[in-house]
Amino acid sequence: MARLVVLGGGVSGHTAATFAAKWLGSQHEVVVVTPNSKWNWIPSNIWVGVGQMTKDEVTFDLAPVYAKAGITYKQAKAVSINPEGSESKEKPFVTVEFTSEEQAGQSEEIEYDYIINATGPKLNFGATPGLDAGHTVSVCTADHAVHASQELAKSIEKMKNGERQKFLIGTGHGMCTCQGAAFEYIFNIEHELSKAGVRDMADIKWISNESFLGDFGMGGLHMKVGGYAVSSKIFTESLFTERGVDWLIGAHVSKVEEGRIEYELLDGSTGEEEFDFSMLIPPFAGVGLKAYNKAGEDITDTVFAPNGFMKVDANYAAGSYENWKASDWPKTYQNPTYDNMFACGIAFAPPHPISKPMSSPNGTPINPTPPRTGMPSGIIGKAVAHSICDRILKGENAPLHESSMADMGAACVASAGKGLFDGTAAAMTVYPVVPDFEKYPGTGRDTDYTFGEIGLAGHWIKHILHYLFIWKAKLKAGWTMIPE
């Protein structure tokens, strides 16, 4: 019997574990280690954050789902990996610390034949002084989003009582990703304020590390809209202007205090913004896993990149922006040192950003880091699981499945306000996610498969997808037929 251990139960890890359990059957064991007792459909947290969904609508208990799938479930966090075993253990193992109330303070060493690192990110609020002090809110977790909704309700009540409010939404550091989540949240807030009849009492501003609106960590894109190729910059600026939302871009938030932030811009100038309500996405980092060799020596730098994400089959020596190629991006997500270790989702270390790297004259880097969430996470998780299952069932020389973001298309539906008849969302497809300027000169992407529209139909699609993906994650009838 072979044992596959999956670290993390988010979109990528859950996808990998559930498909692996289905493909391997009862002859082999799949173990999931995740500190959370609940699964969270994170894309809908923005609706929780404006009071349009409850926490229970975007989460469910993992234990019964994994029991149904025959998956061994450990509510714990991984703290270290020994990929060579140790002097007392022949097989490789991962050390975990339990997080449930019943087992709090206990730890376990879990041996494995294969391991997938799908731990996702550490929400690095501490990277910006004051971002972790409660002056701003977040929608990164369901609990964060509940708190954000409560604070938003207080602001709306103040506006109803004649008190003008300033809203500041965006990224809280020069190296953030997930501009898309902040984009959705700012327009959902604008929509809710309009519905509440207090939009005229609000000043809403976007702050982001993007060098232009519509970068989204992908270097922007050109998409077909109404038969014409339109840049995401024009598309996004039009929406901001239409909704009366101001913007401040190329910004690194350097300090957060009660009711104000300090920032530095790409031109080296500094400034400050005041706010009554603010949601700033934190930068991401690896969760802090350590690695040790058989002698107990620290080999963390061998297994993980400096940002804490696991090294895979990417070209980490591409050098300057002018040398970057689509082929730099990983295909199999196998660790180059230990061939039974893989990473997927946010947990793998990208070779470099997608957007052009920029920094201020003061040397402060201000550019988005590459997104690896949503559809790509699920696709990569499934591909990695497929590779490992083939090696377990067909032999260790079975070829690995490939799923490069440079050969992958992705669909994104970004909500701009929830409502059965007045909701809107920007529905987009991008191919490929990582631009390939050798194959598609000029735009880097195939404009026949990169297109977008905004409207009520997009909102219906996002609303339907919410229920479809929760149905899939619960492994209900036909779950394997719903695409990642």
Image (spheres, rainbow, N blue to C red):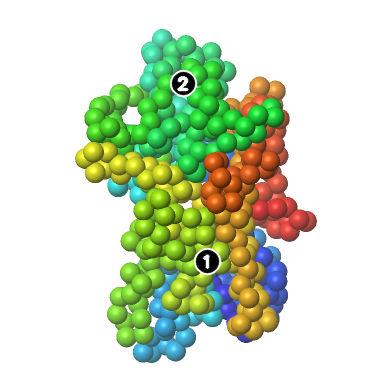
Query: Would you call the spot at circle 2 few (<14 residues within 10 Å), some (14-19), or many (20 or more)?
Result: some
Residue 84: x %, y % from top left: 42, 83
Number of marks in the image?
2
Of residues 259 and 342, the one nearer the viewer is 342
Which residue extends farthest left?
Answer: 362
Quarter placement of the N terminus: bottom right
Label 1 – label 2 distance at C-alpha = 40 Å
Which residue extends farthest right?
Answer: 478
Q: As displayed, is residue 333 above or below residue 83? A: above
Residue 74: x %, y % from top left: 52, 68
Checking the image for residue 163, the label placed there is none
Of residues 24 and 56, the one nearer the viewer is 24
Q: Is residue 148 left or right of residue 230?
A: left
Residue type, numbered disc 2? Val
Q: Which residue is mark 2?
A: 245
Residue at 54%, 23% in the rendered image: 239
Residue 87: x %, y % from top left: 36, 89
Q: Which residue is mark 1?
A: 333
* Quadrant of the image occupied by residue 192: top right
Q: Is residue 26 left or right of residue 94?
A: right
Residue 48: x %, y % from top left: 54, 36
In what element is the residue under mark 2?
loop
Residue at 42%, 47% in the rendered image: 369
Residue at 66%, 53% in the rendered image: 484
In what element is the residue under mark 1?
loop
* Quadrant of the image occupied by residue 285: bottom left
Looking at marks 1 and 2 on the same chain, the residue that comes earlier in the sequence is marked by 2
Residue type, numbered disc 1? Tyr
Q: As displayed, is residue 119 above or below residue 341? A: above
For the residues labelled 1 and 2, say whether their Cβ atoms are less than 8 Å apart: no
Can residue 116 be seen here? The reply is yes
